[in-house]
Image (cartoon, rainbow, N blue to C red):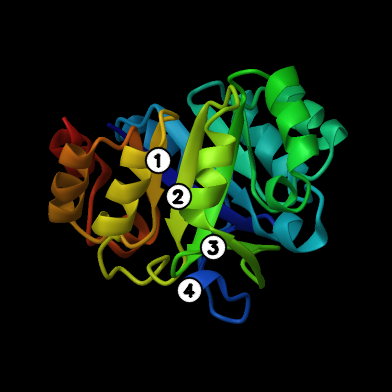
Amino acid sequence: MNVIPAIDLRAGKVVRLIQGQYDRQITYGDDPAEQAKQFHADGAQWLHVVDLDGAKAGKPVNTETIAAIAALNLLRIEVGGGIRDEASIRQLLDMGVTRVIIGTKAVSDFEWFRLMAEKFKGQIVLGLDARDSMVATHGWLQDSKQTVLEFAAQADKLPLAAIIYTDIAKDGMLSGPNIERTKSLVEAVRTPVIASGGVREVDDIRRLAPIGVAGVIVGRSLYEGTLTLPDAIAAAK
């Protein structure tokens, strides 16, 4: 199980949004590239980057910052946030991003998502964000009419790199991950599932490890100091 630290970008800064709400922002740093270096020094192999401005705008916005992180050539990087056309996918991959996360457009135009998954085999990740059992879209500002498991079953037929499952109610709350729903998703699909949202401490990592997730994304707990990356990596092993 990979432990994947997260950098959420807004106006070029390292931030976190509480439950994805743009008016509930905590700013943690002004230098995302420096933060990426620290994560690498602490043992990370992957980095999860979310372009929050992009999620709202419907197109990548913090591209200069993402390019600067990729240029370090220290970590494999996955990027999400407002990626809704092929040009944006190519732009990020050309920067050196390893895989691209698509959420909203996957739900609103599944045929397009299928084409992108087949064109960029093993480089596309489905960002499956859930409010209760339903899929949420548009930077978590809207809910769809599809359940997580129904949509995941459709996506499971595609050559995806992974599915990132985020429980919005847990994200940024440090209240522990949703083990039960994450486990249900892992058991329902063959695609590797990465858990996201709610991880507070080492015990949360230990609870996730046995259910078969391929990775866990950790964010606020690292910035708030309730968890260290070396401890998380050790627990994951």
Instruction: Quote the CA–CA distance across marks 1 and 3.
Output: 21 Å
What residue lies at 68% left-to-right and 55% top-to-bottom?
12
Give the vertical position of 112 relative to 109 (above or below).
above
What residue lies at 75% left-to-right and 64% top-to-bottom?
56
In the rendered view, does 15 fall on the left or right side of 132?
Answer: right
Q: Are marks 2 and 1 in contact (CB under 8 Å)?
A: yes
Instruction: Quote the CA–CA distance across marks 1 and 4.
Output: 20 Å
- Quadrant in the picture for residue 136: bottom right
Residue at numbered disc 2: 165
Give the vertical position of 148 relative to 74 (above or below).
below
Amino acid type for the residue under numbered disc 4: Ile
Q: Earlier in the sequence, mark 2 or mark 1?
A: 2
Marking on residue 18: 4
Q: Nearer the viewer, mark 1 or mark 4?
A: 1
What residue lies at 58% left-to-right and 76% top-to-bottom?
21
Amino acid type for the residue under numbered disc 3: Val
Instruction: Quote the CA–CA distance across marks 4 and 2.
Output: 17 Å
In the rendered view, does 12 fall on the left or right side of 21?
Answer: right
Q: Callout 1: few (<14), some (14-19), or many (20+) C-alpha neighbours within 10 Å? A: many
Q: Helix or strand or loop: what does disc 3 sit on?
A: strand
Residue 200 percent coordinates (x, y): 25, 61
Amino acid type for the residue under numbered disc 2: Tyr
Residue at numbered disc 3: 15
In the rendered view, does 36 fall on the left or right side of 95?
Answer: left
Give the vertical position of 13 relative to 159 (above or below).
below
Q: Helix or strand or loop: what does disc 1 sit on?
A: strand
Q: Earlier in the sequence, mark 1 or mark 3?
A: 3
Marking on residue 194: 1
